[in-house]
Amino acid sequence: MPWRRACLEAAALVLAGGALGLAANLVRSDPLPWRAAAAYETLVPCPEPIGEATPLDPHDPALNDPRTVLVSALNAAESRSLPLVPRLIIPYDYLQEVAAADVRQVAAARAARVVVVGDGQRPDSGEQLARELAWRGIRNVFFVHGGAPALAAAHGGRP
């Protein structure tokens, strides 16, 4: 029975390795503790740079207010198909922080409100961009609830 001998040899190696590791820890000047001094801190979910942004109904008249800056979180081609023309296009990538230059562009608009329109999916890229802009210091930030599809349905355009 060669498998029995292989199991015994493996067990002997594990025991010998464990004994050697314990002996090495005992002779160290700063031995590793048997137990952690404090409980491990686990961050779930990971902290995110997120501020507060308010959902805005796609029928809200504020969307047509000249003091509103409409920001698209979609790519350029998708942004061109929106029924309302965005003043700024900042394609949102969940894996990258919004560029400081883009944040400065939004701040330079000096708008009464910033409204971000995204893809309307879960999570909505518009909501995520709006929350990141708010976290970065932009005030009066909103996002179109339902994103581009809701905006298209409300304003007779295609998403």
Image (spheres, grey):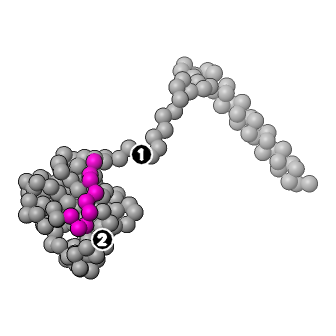
| Kind of residue sitting beneath label 1 | Cys
Q: Does residue 12 sit above or below 6 in this rendering? A: above
Q: Does residue 7 sit above or below 27 in this rendering? A: below
Q: Residue at x 17, y 57 (%)?
A: 114
Q: Residue at x 7, y 54 (%)?
A: 110
Q: Which residues are magenta?
A: 52-60
Does residue 17 appear to the left or right of 46 in the view shown? right
Count residues near mark 1 (Cα–Cα under 10 Å), then give few for <14, some for 14-19, many for 20+: few
Secondary structure beneath dot 1 equals loop
Does residue 17 appear to the left or right of 43 in the view shown? right
Q: Does residue 100 sit above or below 157 in this rendering? A: above
Tell me where residue 125 appears, x and y as whole percent: 31, 62
Would you say residue 37 sits in the magenta stretch? Answer: no
Q: Does residue 133 sit above or below 27 in this rendering? A: below
Distance from disc 1 to disc 2, alpha carbons, whole Å, reads 30 Å
Q: Nearer the viewer, residue 91 or 127?
A: 127
Would you say residue 55 sits in the magenta stretch? Answer: yes
| Contact flag, marks 1 and 2 (Cβ < 8 Å) | no
Does residue 29 appear to the left or right of 24 in the view shown? left
